[in-house]
Amino acid sequence: MKKRNFMRWGWTVMLSCSLLAAGCGSGQEAVPGAGNSPSQATESTLEKAKKQGFVTVGFANEKPYAYATPDGKLTGEAVEVARAVLSKMGINEMNGVLTEFGSLIPGLVAKRFDIITAGMYITPARSKEVAFANPEYSIGEALAVKKGNPLELRSYQDIAANAKAKIAVMSGAIEMEYLEKSGVKKDQMVLVPDQPSAIAALQAGRADAITMTGPSLQAVLESAKDSNVERVMDFVQPVIDGQSIRGYGAAAFRKEDEDFVKAYNEELKKLNDSGELLKILEPFGFTEQELPGDKTAEELSKK
């Protein structure tokens, strides 16, 4: 089952520039003492990217965050956000390096690429190795109910407080633990094998609500195309063992690229403030509930 700590998979390989719609270019770093001029050797990553008009990004081929389409186009939530931000900085092309998720941070540090665009969660441990931009999205749990929300269910606690309320949840999913720790009894849970079975239970009246992560639920609802079912847009995220379970994803840079991070954050904020960020996220199953709010990388790195 897909959980909050998403499964990341892939293989390490450099995507041929000819496969990418973004175009081609050299992503090699200037190396002091290797025939580079003094100006090249001291150029920051941002200065070099602006001069060349392109940057090299690492991704892990995971939908909806970053992946290559069958015709070779590099796309995904994280990629398209980065594309929009970078274009406003005068960097109009991105070359992609397909990398196993666990090798993304080592690859960035080793200068195999200049930015990680993989929807990577900001965590204190990762923040010791890389510099994160401010978050571009957040993901938590979500709830869907019958139209009009007849039982007025807006949190797991609301379900716990109503002994007659039933919630469909995938067997073995992390949501079972979240529900139990929120006070929901086991006999209130309708265990189903998969996402289609969850929506079917709600449609048939065997459950009053269904739950899964936000983008997953949105995808299920869009597939169902049932006007009698709706997402609870004012859902209150559960707090488990005193901690928020919401995760925040962002682009990552090398620690020394402070100027790049600063410039990137400035343009990302403009996208968010204008509403353009949501428009970029929506085609990948994100809604206003998945916007990052006012969280910063600095705050999340100390969480």
Image (cartoon, grey):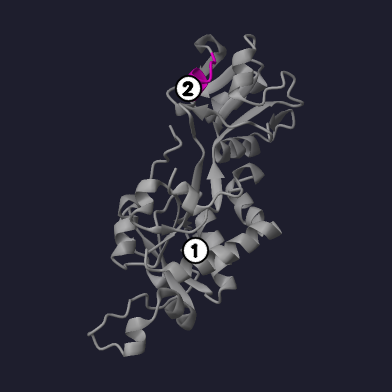
- Find residue 252 and name its label: none
Q: Earlier in the sequence, mark 1 or mark 2?
A: 1
Residue 160, picture quadrant: top right
- Residue at image mark 1: 73
- Residue 59 in view of the camera: yes
The residue at 54%/31% (across/down) is 212
| Along the viewing direction, whichever of 2 and 237 lies nearer the viewer | 237
The residue at 31%/80% (across/down) is 30
The residue at 33%/56% (across/down) is 129
The quarter of the rendered structure image containing the C terminus is top left
Hey, what amino acid is under mark 2? Met
Q: How dense is the environment of label 1, judged by Cα within 10 Å: few (below 14), some, or many (20 and up)?
A: some
Residue numbers of the magenta segment:
176-184
| Relative height, residue 51 to residue 239 (above, below) | below
- Residue at image mark 2: 176
**The magenta stretch spans residue 181:** yes
The residue at 54%/15% (across/down) is 184
Question: What is the C-alpha distance between the residues marked 1 and 2?
Answer: 38 Å
| Along the viewing direction, whichever of 293 and 154 lies nearer the viewer | 293
Task: Label 1, secondary structure: give it.
Answer: loop
Residue 226, picture quadrant: top right
| Relative height, residue 170 to residue 245 (above, below) | above
Q: Is residue 150 left or right of residue 82?
A: right
Q: Main secondary structure of the magenta part?
A: helix
| Along the viewing direction, whichever of 233 and 216 lies nearer the viewer | 233
Residue lying farthest to the left in this orientation: 33
